[in-house]
Every structure is written in structure tokens, then in C-alpha cells.
Image (tube, coloured by chain):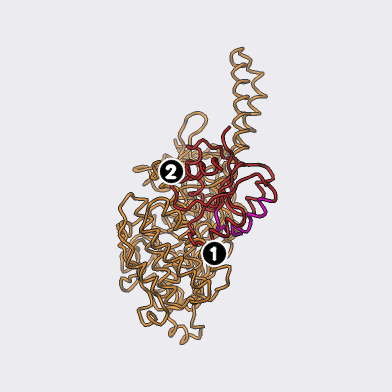
Chain colours: A orange, B red
Amino acid sequence: MDISRYRDLFVSEAREHLTALGSLSVRCEKGETGSSIINELFRHAHSLKGMAATMQLDPIAILAHALEDLLDKVRSGSLTITRSAADLMLAAIDTLEQLVTRVADGEGLPDTEALANRIRSYTPAATDGEPAVVRSAVVPSAQAAADAPRFRSSSDTSTTRIKTSLLDRLVTISGELLTVRHSLENRATCNDTAGMAQPLKELSSLLRQLQNEVFQARMQPFGAIAERYPRMVRDLARKSGKEISFSMSGDSIELDRGVLEQMIEPLMHLLRNAVDHGLEPPAERITAGKTASGNLQLAVSRQADQILLEIRDDGRGMDPARIRSKAVSQGLLTKQLADALTLQETLLLICTPGFSTASGISDISGRGVGMDVVQSAIQTIGGTLTIDSLPGSGTTITLRLPVSVAIIHALMVRCGELQLAVPVSAVTSTCEIRHHEILQRGRELYLLRDGAEIPLRNLPRFFRQKETLPDNGLLPVLLTESNKQPVGLLVDRLLGQQEVFVRPLHHPLADLRGISGSCLLGSGQIVFIVDPNACTGPVIAQ
Amino acid sequence: MPQTVMIVDDALFIRTVLRTMLEECGCQILAEAASGLEALRCLHAVTPDLIFLDIILPDANGIDILDDIHRRLPDTAVIICSSISQEQTIHKALQHGAAAYLHKPFTQEAVAAVLKQLEDG
């Protein structure tokens, strides 16, 4: 039997064990050393060993075995998990992760005997004098991604498990769909159009059921991707000499796995930024009258049909004046424009491509992608990013994400010759206004509403369409929010609401500004989906 | 008639590999379970001829649930399938009525040999 055909399954399950091992090790190091956590650690190492041996991947089996033996000593009480023991365990886990990646890439595996020996011969007295973090021996095979200004898609969740009961329901629905098809075929042969009404009704009800079931199958708890973060924050804190107490909440909240997958790297980046730039070293915190240990929180919550991810730190916060002067000195906007920005808009300048306030390139987050890539990753899945920050008190970055991305409710609008779809989740309300309610100041339009001036964007003009004024003088406006501030989008006509299946755009269409995807109407017409955020964006983007 | 089997192992990978090997030997897999509790629950619904049982499960020790299985299905043969190779563990498993011990990692030949060993009594 050719065992290599099980490679994908091995890789996916081995990664689950390694993520669990990493997060449990960090908990252990923090002092949670109850027998249940040690048993869990042992079981993951043991399972990995058995799987690797079955796959005849000896370097992985050997290392996992050494880890298992170390944990067995902890279990039997002959060893306690000190900092250096945790370092050694994490080094082994890192190496195992790299080895599994090599397996996934079809590469050969290096020998792991040396590291395994170090683990086997580990005694606290012998190694406590060594540097705190002992990094793994194997060089990762694909480091190139770090330099490219976009996130690579993660393959961690490329396989999914669903309940057999759900599969059974899908089979039932498929069977019923077949019956409806036969019934429609019969009536079509007899030209009985009137008789088609009932089977068509059944068809739409079955499709609705099918859609719900499939979407249910795609939902995964946030915890599925969250296990990696405590470990990452711990390592970054150790590297930068900071003390950080990291907490997470809301791991059981479910999101579409497509959304989850897209969030793995942006969240890593935001946490890395918080550790690297947000939180201060202990001495600086004490001088500022804070606790030596900084607080970092990742909180997930659900609000109607949106998921809120908040990354909160109680670090030094952001200085709007510094951000403004930096943006001006980098030529991103004029001083005059910069001074006119609201606080929210100023903070969002850090998401402008090319913006950086880091004084030097740090090993931790100076390289790789910046906030602009984080923001565009969030926008690609129809989410928004907002920043709240108070100098001296800390920063909160809030991501609002749709629960699901594949099928959305969209408002169909006409802009010149274009029909466009605007996600309903992005629209707070719609209204019709008259010309005299519009105030023009320079090139900017404002809508006067209840004494307030709401910035107005002309969508036909944005998409370079000829503006056609409606006969009755009423102008339809979609109200949306950009960075918590209301913004109006002027369109030519509202055509109604519809559920649409979102299809992503690929190069070169993916570069179209203001467009986040496309959908196909029943008539065969292709309609672009508008990304309201990109159309309303900060003034500098105009 | 093909022998019917249930596989109990927390690793989907191991269950999948073992399932294929057993099917190649002509066995029919009735159920798979990833934990001790799931295994005992499955036994309300199916009565396999053989059970391949892992020792280190998330919620139990395989050897500890051997007695439960025997009480419920006295005619079912249980094969312990583990990478633990300590003499005393194997001895304990056999003492608790395990019909055979299949070492991990296993090969197609080893699986076939265990099946033959059981057939020969």
C-alpha cells in the first residue's frame, strides 16, 4: 500500500496537534501544570509520533518521541516545566512544524537526532544557564513570503470535518432536488407552464435549505485559528524583552471558514504591532505609572450579522501629531489637508501604503507587510477596520467582519450605464434627497441633514459614468459609514434588493478601485460588487 | 462473510489508514470512534466482530474500557493497537482479554497477520 497518498491528511492533522502542543506549552510555562494539561500534551506528542511512524517519517517520529518522553518525566513528577524546559519544548514544536511543512511541500527531511538528544538528556541544572530561547535547527524552506506585501493564504484549514448527520441531510436534499427536476421536466415536455409554479416553489425552498446546510458546514469557531496566538505573543514578548499578559475571549463564536482563513495573518500582524510598537518595556511602563506587565487582549464578539474582533493594548498609544507630520514629510498629503483631518482619519493614515513610523527596522515587525495590507485584507472580505487610540493609554483596533462572505444581500443600484451591487450590510439607510439639500464646497459635496453636514460621494462620477439626473429631481442616496462617520453615496437609481453569490475577482480586475467582487444575475449579466469603504475612503485617497 | 470492524483511535489519520488496510483484507468497517465515550456509544448501534482499540484516548485509557466492551459484547474480539511497546502494558492488555496486540506503526502485512492469527484462533 502506498502510504504517501495520506500525506495531506497527515499534514492537516499533524498541524492540529502541533498548534495544540504550542498553546498548551505556553499555558504550562505560565504555571498551569495540572495533570490534565500534562496528559493532554503527552497525548498530542504521542499521537503525532504514531502518525509520523506510520508515514515512515522518522525524523518527525524521533523528535515527537523525545518530546513524549520528556512529558512522561513531567507526568511522573521527576521533572518540572521551567522556563528552559518550555523553551526546549517550543523549539522542538517549531522544528516539528517546519518538518511538517517540508512534508507538505514534498521535500526531504533533515536529521533530528541532535535536537532529540538534547531533549532526552535535558536536566534543568544543565541548561538553565543557556540563552532563554533556543530556536530550532531547521531553516524554514519558504521565507520569501515575508518580503511580499501581501498575505499568503493559509492552508491550515484546507480540510474540514462535518457531522455525518449533516451529510445525510445534504443527501436527502439532493434526492428531493432530483424529484423536483423530474417534475419540472415532465411539465416542460407537456408545455404546462402553469403547472411549473408548484415545483418551482419547491425548488426555491430546497435551494434555501441546501444553502443553509452548506453554510452551517462552513462555520467554524474562532478558537480554530486562535490557538496559535498565545504562543506567538509569548515568543515576541520574550524576544523584545517585554512582559505581556495576553488574554483572548469569544473563541466559541462561529465564522465562515473563508473569513477565518483570511484573518489568520492580519491578526498576527496586528498583535505583532501591539507587542512591538504599542506596549512599552517594563521600565518605561513603571515610569509612566503603569504595571510592569502590559495587557494585550483579543476579544471576539457578535453584533447582529457582524463579527467584531478587537485588539486592545494598554501601551503608549498613538500620537496623532506625529502621524500627521510623518505623513506630510513622506509626501502622502499636504499639510493643509493633514490639519483638516479628524482624529479618526488621522489614525487611519497608518493604513496608507508606504506609511511607517517605526524609527528603525526591527526584527519583529519592521519587515514584511504593513497596515495597508492588513486593511486591504479586511476590506477584501467586506470588513472594516477602525482605530481608537489615546496617547499614554493604549490602542484598540476594531475589525468588523461579515459572518459569511459567499452569499450576501445586495442592494442593486444604477450608476450611469453600470448596474452595481452594494452589500446591504454596509448600508445604514437609504433616502431620497433634493438638489437644494446638497452643499458644494470646492470639489467636495455634503448632504445637509438635521443640521449636520454629511460628506457625499458621487458614485457615478467615481466610476467615471455619465451622470443622468432623474426627472422628478429626487436623488437616491445610500448612507454608509466610514470610520464611524456617516457618508452618503449618491447613485442614479435604486433597483431593489437581491441575494447574490459573490465571486472573487482576479488579476487584472482585482485591482479595480472601489470594487470587491462580482456576481452573476439570473439573466446572465455580470454585476460588480461595490466596496463602499474604498469609495468613501479618507480624503487623501481621492 | 466479511468480518465487521469498529476502529477506535483519536487520530483521523490512523483511522483512515487502518480502514483502508482492513478493507483491503476484506473487512467491512461498521463504525469509527475518536474517544472512549464515542466508542461505547457506538456499541449501542453496532455489533462488530472485531474492535481495533487505541490505548491513549482523549478521555480514557483503552485498556480500562476493555472490560466495558467485553461486558457488552462478549463475542467481539478486541485488538489493542498502540505504539506503546512496554512488556507490562501488553501483558495488562492481554490480561484484560485483548485478543491481539497490533504495534504502531503497522503495515498492511502486520494487519493481515493479526487477522489471520484471530481466524486461526
Residue A464: image quadrant is: top left
Marks 2 and 1: CB-CB under 8 Å? Answer: no
Out of A263 and A338, give the one closest to the viewer: A263
Chain ID for label 1?
A
- Tell me if B47 is positioned left or right of A152 in this view: right
Quadrant of the frame with the N terminus of chain A: top left
Q: Is residue A419 visible?
A: yes
Residue B61 located within the stretch drawn in magenta: yes
Residue B109: assigned label: 2
10 Å neighbourhood of mark 2: few (<14), some, or many (≥20)? Answer: few
Q: Farthest front residue? A: B121
Q: Which marked residue is nearer to the observer: mark 2 or mark 1?
A: 2
Amino acid identity at mark 1 = Glu
Residue B59 located within the stretch drawn in magenta: yes
Out of A322 and B59, give the one closest to the viewer: B59
Q: Farthest top residue? A: A190
Q: Magenta region: which residues? A: B54-70
Which element is circle 1 on?
Answer: helix
10 Å neighbourhood of mark 1: few (<14), some, or many (≥20)? Answer: some
- Tell me if B3 is positioned left or right of A63 in this view: right
Residue B48 % position (x, y): 62, 42
Amino acid identity at mark 2 = Glu
Give the residue pinned by disc 1.
A40
Residue B81 % position (x, y): 52, 52
Residue A131 % position (x, y): 35, 78
